[in-house]
Amino acid sequence: DWGGISEEDIVSALNSGKILIPQMEVVPTAVVANPDTPPELEIRFDMAPPIPDFDDLSTPLPDNWCIRFVHNQLFKYFEFPSRFCPGPFHSTILRKADFRSPAHKEAYFAKCDAAIKKWRLGGPKPLNNGGWDVDGKPLEET
């Protein structure tokens, strides 16, 4: 059996207190075509810089550090034969991309780069607007 993770296992892990989930604040780093033929277009959320400055503890944490932080905990907590991490953190935004010409492809990615630069100027943004309990309801303020 290749295994996998049941919903009950995930809920149990999260309720155990062994998986720490910080406020998730992310910012995209690039839009890229993956190496598939035809390619998929992906928006990436790389950790930037890729290695934190461990010598200067006053240095801010890298952008998107929280994604790797949660990923590493889950990867360590759940062990089964088919456990696999396909690469950088990304979201596929288009499958089987094709362009009318190399010039169209270049223009498309230039617009993507401009959008990512504008997005990055604003810095990481929270994935939600507040604290949420395990049942999906907002946490009550005390």
Image (cartoon, rainbow, N blue to C red):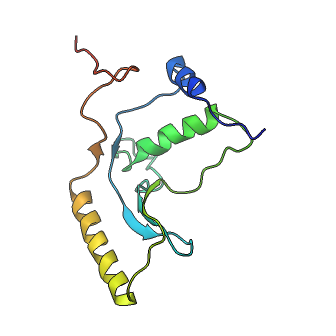
- Residue 117 sits above or below residue 133 on the image: below
Residue found at x 43% / y 31% = 21
Residue found at x 64% / y 33% = 78
Residue found at x 69% / y 35% = 79
- Residue 113 sits above or below residue 43 on the image: below
Residue found at x 22% / y 15% = 141
The number of discs equals: 0
- Return the residue nearer the eye: 74 or 104: 104
| Residue 85 image offset from top left, x and y in percent | 60, 50
| Residue 109 image offset from top left, x and y in percent | 34, 76
- Return the residue nearer the eye: 12 or 46: 12
**Horizontal side, residue 84 vs residue 95: left or right:** right
The image quarter in which residue 127 lies: top left
**Horizontal side, residue 58 vs residue 94: left or right:** left
Work out which quarter of the rendered image holds the C terminus and state it. Answer: top left
Work out which quarter of the rendered image holds the N terminus and state it. Answer: top right
